[in-house]
Image (cartoon, rainbow, N blue to C red):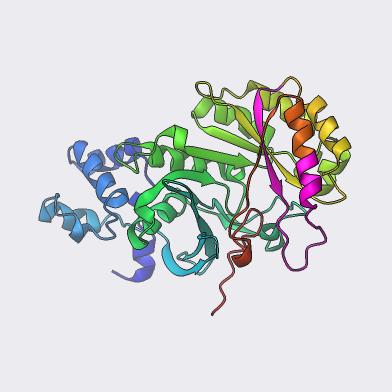
Amino acid sequence: MSKRNENSLPNLSDFTLPELEEFIAASGKEKYRARQIMKEIHQFGCLSFDAMTTLARDFRKTIAQTARIYRPSMVKIQKSQDGTQKVLLGLEDGLFVESVLIPGKNHWTLCISTQAGCAMGCAFCLTARQGFKRNLTPAEIVGQVVTIRKETPEGEAVGNIVLMGMGEPLANYENTVKAIRILTSDFGLGFSSRRITVSTCGLARQILQLGSDICINLAVSLNAHDDETRSRLMPVNKKYPLATLLDACKKYPMPGRRMLTYEYILIDGVNASRQDAQKLTLLLADQRCKINLIVFNEYPGSPFRAPSPHVVSDFQQVLLDRHFTAMLRKSKGSDILAACGQLSGTYTTG
């Protein structure tokens, strides 16, 4: 079979369990075979049907004629002085995406991408400068986790997944939700929904849909207390201004006692003054939330700068004094452009 024809076959790595059961049943086999195949693909990392020794040899030969298995391949790893690792992964069509392994006390957090490039155009983000190339498939989203678990020593210790890498997850809505279903399936990766967080720039309509479709942690990139500033930083605000966005966030059904997270990137001279903090407390006064403060991660060519530690401390203290849960999130991996807003998916040698 030619490579071109082979690539036209359905990729079983894209399938949720119900979809895989339907596919297997259509071939005349028992539905429980779908659970076996799903485990082989996602838990054992099989890339060929020949390696699936739990299946009968004849069945393996038959299914290989009608389907394939594919996930991204690891191209390069860069290691930061703080232990963070940026992983460059190659896709079938020659594009690249980046994932980031972030060290914690007892486990690693893996930040994964949902698009190659990004169309949101946030002024402070390096990924936005690359432009939008395409959405990732469920196999390419989940496959970042599978590849890194299989091919790095740290992969097996990944305890949390954050969809905060390249791209806007909710702009690739269907594939993102399918990926989460695979990540949380007992026959997929088996992650608890408590361990997965979706980050969005603020697509209000999709936030409401996500709340009705799937139970998952949500982080919203806020970055300003007024529409004028936020529209300058984030063009999405022109479509979904703050009032619309915050209304959607209030309606989002955070599971259990968990709180929705607002992410606020502190940029010197733009949104980081004490007055900005005071106005932010008024904006969020009726929101049940926590606030992650992120000092802007500078990169070559950026027009923005990070505020001083004193300014950052003052901003946080205003929030704490108003009884908000406000945490300063320490950025990691900035020396290898692996911190928030620095991913580019660019392949360079060396």
Name the one closer to the observer, 101 or 140. Answer: 101
Residue lying at 69% horizontally and 60% vertically, measured from the top left:
126
Residue 158 appears in the picture as rendered: yes
The C terminus - image quarter:
bottom right
Q: Residue 98, position in %: x, y? A: 53, 60
Residue 240 appears in the picture as rendered: no
Name the one closer to the observer, 201 or 336. Answer: 336
Q: Is residue 329 left or right of residue 152?
A: right
Residue lying at 26% horizontally and 45% vertically, measured from the top left:
39
Can you say whether 21 is above or below 140 in the image?
above
Can you say whether 204 is above or below 159 in the image?
above
Residue 337 figure quarter: bottom right
Q: Residue 30, position in %: x, y? A: 17, 37
Q: Is residue 303 magenta?
A: yes
Residue lying at 73% horizontally and 27% vertically, measured from the top left:
246
Q: Residue 53, position in %: x, y? A: 14, 54
> Which region shows up in magenta?
287-314
Q: Is residue 35 left or right of residue 218?
A: left
Residue lying at 35% horizontally and 43% vertically, measured from the top left:
189
Q: Is residue 232 left or right of residue 128?
A: right
Q: Is residue 263 magenta?
A: no
The N terminus - image quarter:
bottom left
Q: Residue 204, position in %: x, y? A: 68, 32
